[in-house]
Image: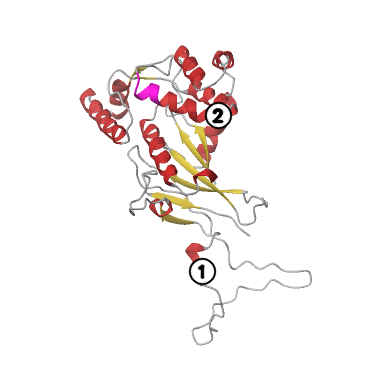
Amino acid sequence: MRVEIWSDIACPWCYIGKARFEKGLAEFAHRDEVEVVHRSFELDPGRAKGEREQVIDMLAAKYGRTREEAAGMEANVAANARAEGLGYRTEGRDHGSTFDIHRLLHLAKARGRQDELLTLAYRANFAEERSVFDDDVLLALAVEAGLDGEEARAVLADPEAYADEVRADEREAAELGANAVPFFVRRTRTRSGRTSGRRPNWAPTRCRSSSSTGGTASPEASPPRSSSRRWSRPGRTARSPRSPPSAATRRPATRTGPARSRAADPRVARLTPLRAAEPSSRAGRPSPLIRNPWVRDVKFGH
């Protein structure tokens, strides 16, 4: 199974969500079979490089609040972060463009050090007195994550290096309907394990939050499979759909195996609570995987 996570370094709920996800994954019996891939998402894609402001001022302007109310919002996020054992500064943090950070994360992905750099960048942005919007800080983080310093410097100096990869991630997020982060996609193998036509070899399961505090997902409905389609062969005419048998003429089921409900059919798109898909602790409590309440399963099988 592969889990793809769209997130932004400037997003505090992505910082908290990563910690919750890792705790849940650690409790999962088959965690060694899970591949985690981090994808790029910009909450403020129109912000120019070098354009910075304090987080409190940005929140007040964005949501039409006073600075005191914005500070209260930050205090609430800080309480959630500290409950997960994370450091969080509520004052003195700045906000800027995260495009260069995402480009550097793609370099780290190519070198097998993506998770290390992402963890360090989150910590620097939210817990430490270091600005991830400064190239010197980013370079230091890259070296600390195990990347070659000269290679990382060359990527930061070239604005087109890994820019296409960042934009490709953002296009795919838009196609999947992501309008908030963190945005999780779980991809599982189909029963056939093959790609046939437009049926993907990895079928996506999506869950998303409609607000920064976590909300109800609103995935688009999948088109139903038609049960009335009839294909005509040469020399034959297409038959009209049969009407369902009446209760008097319906023959009893002859299935010998256990009954299979429609909800269990892997070809059927369905909404199920995410908690049902989460690994649980031995005490019976749901694990702190991700607090999004809904997950959409869309699987394609033969």
- The three-letter amino acid code for the residue at tag 1 is Arg
In the displayed orientation, state which residue is furthest to the left. Answer: 68
> From what the image shows, is residue 140 above or below residue 21?
above
Q: Which mark is residue 260?
A: 1
Q: Magenta residues: mostly which secondary structure?
A: helix
The verdict on residue 116 being magenta is: no
* Residue plotted at (29% across, 22% down): 56
> From what the image shows, is residue 2 above or below residue 90?
below
* Residue plotted at (42% across, 37% down): 182
The verdict on residue 126 being magenta is: yes
Q: Quadrant of residue 130?
A: top left
In the displayed orientation, state which residue is furthest to the right. Answer: 235
Relative placement, left or right, of 236 versus 205 is right
Disc 1 and disc 2: Cα gap in Å? 43 Å
- The three-letter amino acid code for the residue at tag 2 is Arg
- The region drawn magenta spans 123-128
Q: Pinpoint residue 88: horizontal percent, then vertical percent.
A: 31, 26
Q: Pinpoint residue 187: horizontal percent, then vertical percent.
A: 54, 46
The residue that disc 2 covers is: 167
Q: Pinpoint residue 186: horizontal percent, then vertical percent.
A: 51, 46
Q: Earlier in the sequence, mark 1 or mark 2?
A: 2
Q: Pinpoint residue 46: horizontal percent, then vertical percent.
A: 45, 23
Looking at the image, how many numbered discs can be counted on the residues?
2
Closer to us: mark 1 or mark 2? 1
